[in-house]
Image: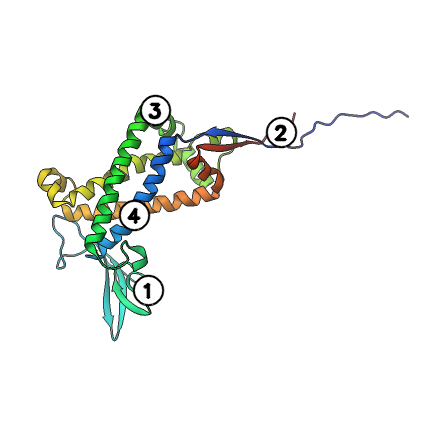
Amino acid sequence: MSTSSHSIPDTTPSAARRSFIRRHSLTVRATHWLNVLCLSFLLLSGLQIFNAHPRLYWGQYGADPDAALLSIGTRQIGSASQGFLQIGPLHVVTTGFLGVSDEGGSATPRAFPTWLTIPSYHDLGAGRRWHFFFAWLLVLNGLLYLAHGFWRGHFRRDLLPNGSQLAPRHLWHEILDHARLRFARGEKARQYNALQKLSYLVVVFGLLPLMVLTGLTMSPGLDAAFHFLPDLFGGRASARTIHFVTAFLLVSFVVVHVVMVIASGLWNNVRSMLNGKYAITDEGVRP
């Protein structure tokens, strides 16, 4: 009796091949970290400024008697102080965080607590100085980033989505992948996906310029020199509201951005913003 042998293809997954690509230039990395610094100080000093009048309005003027779109305040309920957040008809009790915070064992009326403002104590003048310094630093840093991006073709090459990426079906597929924390691997990881490109473009060419322009509109001196600024946003009170909403959207973007960085590989992403090297893993099957 003879025996015959048949060769069986080896389908054992091959060892993952790891290579490094240069993902971010030195200028992009430097401006990125300077943006982190500027936006952090702008947020904390901005909350200090907001605490001086924690109400937002729409129109040419905004003062205590006017109806506010949003307000953070304190009201006395018997012998206790109650903090609240009011957005239109919506009223939410926020004692312990907004309106009234626990500082040194006592309830202190304050829109945002001390640990969220620069300086921590109430000082509008100091808050404005911190805010203006980092605002102008952000503007100069942004101009450098824009000049580099256009000169080196960074925006066209890396951030401009193509037609297939903008297809509704493709975008929906990417939204589902992100919701399930499924991220591109191999060759697909060499470039930004459509959601990354669109979000970066909105931030770079939408939210950041809007925040700068509305900030300039709140300056009486600049309003006197550039009369069109208040009219552009429907008044200084409206500009202040847009400025605050824009800051909230930027904070939301940063939170989502950090979550995605952690979920898709913290060290790999951080390293690419430190030395520019991003690891690509290609997993194949042996023939």
Q: Nearer the viewer, mark 3 or mark 2?
A: 3
Q: Nearer the viewer, mark 4 or mark 2?
A: 4
Q: Amino acid type of disc 1? A: Gly
Q: Which image quadrant for residue 136?
A: top left
Residue 38 position within the rendered picture, expressed as x and y whole percent measured from the top left? 30, 43
What distance separates the C-alpha of mark 1 from that of mark 4?
Answer: 23 Å
Q: Residue furthest right?
A: 1
Q: Which mark is residue 96?
A: 1
Work out whether 94 lies above or below 155.
below
Which element type, helix, strand or loop, lies under badge 1?
loop
Find out whether the residues at labels 4 and 3 contact each other: C-beta distance under 8 Å: no
Q: Which image quadrant for residue 170?
A: top left
Residue drawn at x 38%, y 28% is: 158
Residue 202 position within the rendered picture, expressed as x and y whole percent measured from the top left? 31, 36
Q: Which residue is mark 4?
A: 41
Q: Callout 1: few (<14), some (14-19), or many (20+) C-alpha neighbours within 10 Å?
A: some
Q: Amino acid type of disc 4? A: Phe
Q: Which residue is mark 2?
A: 285
Quadrant (top left, top right, bottom left, bottom right) of the C terminus: top right
Can residue 3 be seen here? The reply is yes
Q: Which image quadrant for residue 68?
A: bottom left
Residue 185 position within the rendered picture, expressed as x and y whole percent measured from the top left? 51, 33
